[in-house]
Image (cartoon, helix red, strand yellow):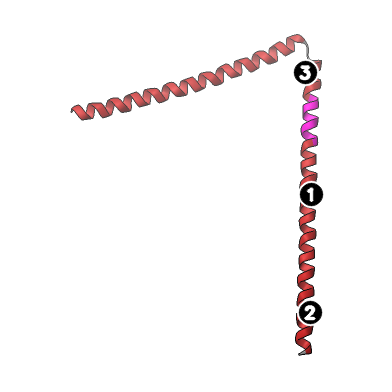
């Protein structure tokens, strides 16, 4: 009887210890996640700052060149979208034509 009480008490203590260790581990993970987020935010802030500094230092010619490249890239993207839409319209046309021809044959 006394042994059972001791065993039960030992199990309770072990469960309490496990629970405490689990909470400690969770707090550590949360702290590491927050530190990681802080590091990420710091890195992004540094990158933005360097971008601002680079743009502040660039000449008007460099700025025009950079903006021109951005415009050209946007045009190419729009052309790719238009080509994709045209390709889809052509495929739809031929699919519809095939269906119509099969109805009349």
Please give the residue where the numbered disc 2 appears in the rendered image: 9
Q: Quadrant of the N terminus?
A: bottom right
Q: What distance separates the C-alpha of mark 1 from that of mark 2?
A: 34 Å
Q: Which residue is drawn at 81% across and 21% down?
A: 53
Q: Is residue 4 magenta?
A: no
Secondary structure category for the residue under label 1:
helix
Q: Dot 2: within a 10 Å radius of its alpha carbon, few (fewer than 14), some, or many (20 or more) residues?
A: few
Q: Give the range drawn in magenta.
A: 42-50
Which residue is at a point 76% across and 66% down the rendered structure image?
Answer: 19
Tell whether label 3 touches label 1 (CB within 8 Å).
no
- Mark 3, Cα crowd under 10 Å, few <14 / some 14-19 / many 20+, is some
Q: In which quarter of the image is residue 76?
A: top right
Magenta-drawn stretch, dominant element (helix, strand or loop)? helix
**Which residue bears the numbered disc 3?**
55
| Residue 49 falls inside the magenta stretch | yes
Marked residue nearer the N-terminal end (3 or 2): 2
Marking on residue 32: 1
């Amino acid at each position: 009887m006394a042994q059972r009480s001791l065993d039960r008490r030992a199990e309770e203590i072990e469960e309490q210890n496990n629970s405490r260790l689990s909470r400690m581990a969770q707090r550590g993970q949360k702290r590491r996640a927050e530190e990681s987020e802080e590091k990420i935010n710091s890195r992004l802030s540094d990158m933005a700052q360097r971008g601002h500094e680079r743009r502040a230092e660039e000449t008007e010619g460099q700025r025009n060149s950079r903006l021109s490249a951005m415009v050209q890239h946007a045009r190419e993207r729009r052309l790719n979208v238009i080509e994709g839409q045209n390709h889809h319209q052509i495929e739809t046309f031929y699919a519809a034509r095939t269906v119509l021809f099969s109805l009349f044959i």
